[in-house]
Image: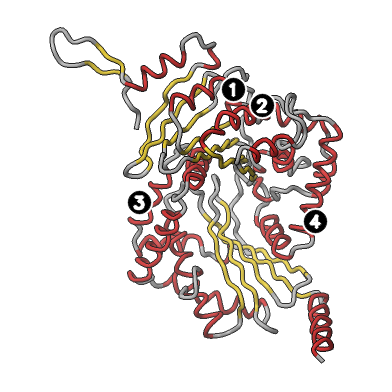
């Protein structure tokens, strides 16, 4: 909700008075150049007792502050509206590479000094890149906020990008890809699933990028990316914790107010055409047992159907009491691991399902056992008791995630970046509470459609089983 910044006291001789926020902004903006002037954009309820104050700097930087003085700590996060979806073919992975580069040298901070200075101040920092966003987060004691803002502003505007730095980080990312994808069964299978499921949309390539693209990046590519996307008008600065609002905003003005906005290009992401036939692929991997990865189409995070589908997934896959776990793991004993996840992205994506066989059982057996369970929720509504349990578990998980300042900051930044509403999490809680068994039946029939799914069968290539046998023999010899 938008907060009114001025009001009048009733009475014939009453004079208009500014409210405290307007008075604070008038003082903060005094003698500031246009790029550094703040305006109050909105006061947004964040649950029943807290509120997020959203401000916008003259250069376009969004500043979202939630004051929480329950502990003398602060979480500062910077969310950039750029992820792998904003890349183009031939340049995949540059958003993730840039996450690494951002921890390097700046014009006034030597290589390695960024982390060292924050650690010495008692702070811890990290970052993440995904399909729709990149963000940087720091947990810090309250007296380190000024230092952290100065360092974050420095690397947003004055990062040093030269051939040695870029080449070094390219090799780091290439090794990360080898470890997390090329030499990791789950990583490789997940990448293949999205590659097969998407023929047009940028979600089809991995956030880490294709190896050929990683090796081919030039310093000029990185400079262009930096100047385009790492700009105040493409960022949201989230401050949560024990802060004085006026002091935090003054520090933001001091450190970010001279930065120029960039011309962020119009996003050019191709919509994924409807899938009308099941897609299948088979791959041999160093695994001891068969596995199956399945991708059904799923709605975008902001879609009305997203919350009911998450609840349905909870009933099917969450915990030992879920339908699929009981059937495939406990009763039929053909699976050793099962999981499901509904993608939480800006655009429609995938409902990922993963099954790992037990013993000599095959992927076809797993699929044959899973399909009737999915058909059952398409044919017959789940029970009210199942739905109530799913709602309670999800609500508990959401509220537990808000117990820390870092948890609050992450939800504010994520929903601001993806949906444009920093408090959308609470609307989602309402959507979970309002969902009916009829809603779950509808989304089951709409999305659990075999003709619109992608299936990846993973078969053992023999190496894992041989290694396991060798290890067993070695252990037997040691025991004797």
Determine the secondary structure under disc 3. Answer: helix
Instruction: Answer with mark 1 or mark 4, whichever residue precedes in sequence.
Output: 4
Determine the secondary structure under disc 4. Answer: helix
- Circle 4 sits on which residue? 178
Residues under numbered marks 4 and 3 in contact, where contact means CB atoms less than 8 Å apart: no
User: How far apart are the two marked residues, 2 and 4, measured between alpha carbons?
Assistant: 32 Å
Disc on res. 430: 3
Instruction: Answer with mark 1 or mark 3, whichever residue precedes in sequence.
Output: 1
Query: What crowding class fits label 3: few (fewer than 14 Cα within 10 Å), some (14-19), or many (20 or more)?
Result: few
- Circle 1 sits on which residue? 255
Residue 331 percent location from the top left of the image? 52, 85
Which image quadrant: the N terminus?
top left
Instruction: Answer with mark 2 or mark 3, whichever residue precedes in sequence.
Output: 2
Q: Quadrant of residue 263?
A: top right
Viewer-nearest of labels 1 and 4?
A: 1
Q: Determine whether 417 is above or below 378 in the image.
A: above
User: How far apart are the two marked residues, 1 and 4, measured between alpha carbons?
Assistant: 38 Å
Drawn side of residue 282 relative to residue 367, left or right: right
Residues under numbered marks 1 and 2 in contact, where contact means CB atoms less than 8 Å apart: yes
User: How far apart are the two marked residues, 4 and 3, measured between alpha carbons?
Assistant: 42 Å
Q: Determine whether 102 is above or below 319 in the image.
A: above
Instruction: Answer with mark 4 or mark 3, whichever residue precedes in sequence.
Output: 4
Viewer-nearest of labels 2 and 4?
A: 2
Query: What crowding class fits label 2: few (fewer than 14 Cα within 10 Å), some (14-19), or many (20 or more)?
Result: some
């Amino acid at each position: 909700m938008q907060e009114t910044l001025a009001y009048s006291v009733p009475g014939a001789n009453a004079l208009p008075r500014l409210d405290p926020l307007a008075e604070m902004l008038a003082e903060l903006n005094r003698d500031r150049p246009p790029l550094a002037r703040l305006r109050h954009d909105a006061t947004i309820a964040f649950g029943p007792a807290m509120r997020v104050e959203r401000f916008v700097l003259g250069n376009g930087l969004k500043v979202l502050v939630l004051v929480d003085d329950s502990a003398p700590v602060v979480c500062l996060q910077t969310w950039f509206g750029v992820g792998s979806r904003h890349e183009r073919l031939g340049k995949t992975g540059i958003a993730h590479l840039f996450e690494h580069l951002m921890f390097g040298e700046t014009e006034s901070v030597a290589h390695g000094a960024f982390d060292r200075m924050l650690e010495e101040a008692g702070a811890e920092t990290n970052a993440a890149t995904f399909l729709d966003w990149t963000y940087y987060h720091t947990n810090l004691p309250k007296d380190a906020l000024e230092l952290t803002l100065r360092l974050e502003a420095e690397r947003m505007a004055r990062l040093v990008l030269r051939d040695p730095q870029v080449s070094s980080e390219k090799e780091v990312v290439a090794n990360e890809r080898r470890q997390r994808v090329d030499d990791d069964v789950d990583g490789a299978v997940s990448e293949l699933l999205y590659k097969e499921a998407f023929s047009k949309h940028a979600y089809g390539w991995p956030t880490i990028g294709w190896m050929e693209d990683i090796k081919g990046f030039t310093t000029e590519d990185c400079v262009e990316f930096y100047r385009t996307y790492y700009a105040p008008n493409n960022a949201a600065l989230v401050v949560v914790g024990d802060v004085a609002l006026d002091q935090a905003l003054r520090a933001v003005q001091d450190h970010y107010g001279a930065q120029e906005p960039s011309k962020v290009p119009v996003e050019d992401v191709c919509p994924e055409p409807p899938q009308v036939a099941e897609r299948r692929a088979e791959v041999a991997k160093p695994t001891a047992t068969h596995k199956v990865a399945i991708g059904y189409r799923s709605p975008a995070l902001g879609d009305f159907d997203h919350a009911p589908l998450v609840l349905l997934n909870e009933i099917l896959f969450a915990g030992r009491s879920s339908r699929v776990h009981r059937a495939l793991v406990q009763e039929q004993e053909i699976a050793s691991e099962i999981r499901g996840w509904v993608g939480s992205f800006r655009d429609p994506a995938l409902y990922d399902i993963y099954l790992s066989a037990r013993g000599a059982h095959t992927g076809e057996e797993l699929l044959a056992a899973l399909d009737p369970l999915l058909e059952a929720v398409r044919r017959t509504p789940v029970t009210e008791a199942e739905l109530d349990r799913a709602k309670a578990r999800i609500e508990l998980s959401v509220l537990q995630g808000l117990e820390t300042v870092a948890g609050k900051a992450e939800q504010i930044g994520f929903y601001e970046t993806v949906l444009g509403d920093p408090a959308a999490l609470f609307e989602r809680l309402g959507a979970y509470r309002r969902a009916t068994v009829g809603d779950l039946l509808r989304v089951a029939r709409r999305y659990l459609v075999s003709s619109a799914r992608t299936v990846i069968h993973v078969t053992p290539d023999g190496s894992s089983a041989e290694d396991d046998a060798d290890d067993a023999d070695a252990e037997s010899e040691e025991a004797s």
